[in-house]
């Protein structure tokens, strides 16, 4: 049974969509609602930082009144939000890692020799 979306999340289009995305196909309990709401809020913070930087033409630094070049504060905010999102995902049991691809067999000397022999054998079979 899906958990009920809090009014503070439902009233914000971005957070509401993020809630739906996060909860789709997952089972959460009522006690997870505050954590889920906080997760949606951190995602909204990241989105706002991205929008702010887009409005600045993709600028990531500025020059202050003293002539010093400084990083935009949105960068450190995004870094903090990203860490919070990872921690909340872990707390909620959400695996935010991309699907693992099949492990490529290590190319040990024995593997290389075996592969080369198989290739030679296949060529010899086709030639003969």
Image: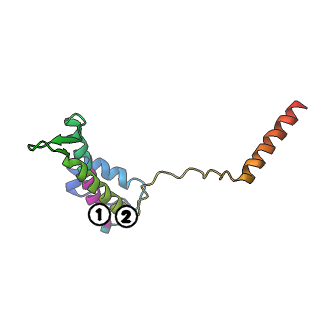
Residues drawn in magenta: 32-43
Crowding around mark 1 (Cα neighbors within 10 Å: few <14, some 14 to 19, many 20+) is: some
Q: Which residue does the numbered mark 1 point to in the structure image? A: 35
Q: Which residue does the numbered mark 2 point to in the structure image? A: 92
Q: Which residue is drawn at 42% across and 55% down?
A: 96
Q: In this view, does 29 lie above or below 48?
A: below
User: Of the residues under marks 2 and 1, which one precedes in the sequence?
Assistant: 1
The single residue placed furthest to the left in the displayed view is 65
Instruction: Let me know if residue 4 appears in the view.
Output: no
Q: Which residue is drawn at 65% across and 52% down?
A: 105
Q: Is residue 3 above or below residue 74?
A: below
**Occupied quadrant, residue 40:** bottom left
Rendered location of residue 30, percent (x, y): 31, 66
Q: Is the magenta stretch mostly helix, strand or loop?
A: helix
Q: In which quarter of the image is the C terminus?
A: top right
Q: Which residue is drawn at 23% across and 46% down?
A: 49
Rendered location of residue 92, percent (x, y): 37, 64
Instruction: Let me know if residue 104 appears in the view.
Output: yes
- Dot 1 falls on a residue whose secondary structure is helix
């Amino acid at each position: 049974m899906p958990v009920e979306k809090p009014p503070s999340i439902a009233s914000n289009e971005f957070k509401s969509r993020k809630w739906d995305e996060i909860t789709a196909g997952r089972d959460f309990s009522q006690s997870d609602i505050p954590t889920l709401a906080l997760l949606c809020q951190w995602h909204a913070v990241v989105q706002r930082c991205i929008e702010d930087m887009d409005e600045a033409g993709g600028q990531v630094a500025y020059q202050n009144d003293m002539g010093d070049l400084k990083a935009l504060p949105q960068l450190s905010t995004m870094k903090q939000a990203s860490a919070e999102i990872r921690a909340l995902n872990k707390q909620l049991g959400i695996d935010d890692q991309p699907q693992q691809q099949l492990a490529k067999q290590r190319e040990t000397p024995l593997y290389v020799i075996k592969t080369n022999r198989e290739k030679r054998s296949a060529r010899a079979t086709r030639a003969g």
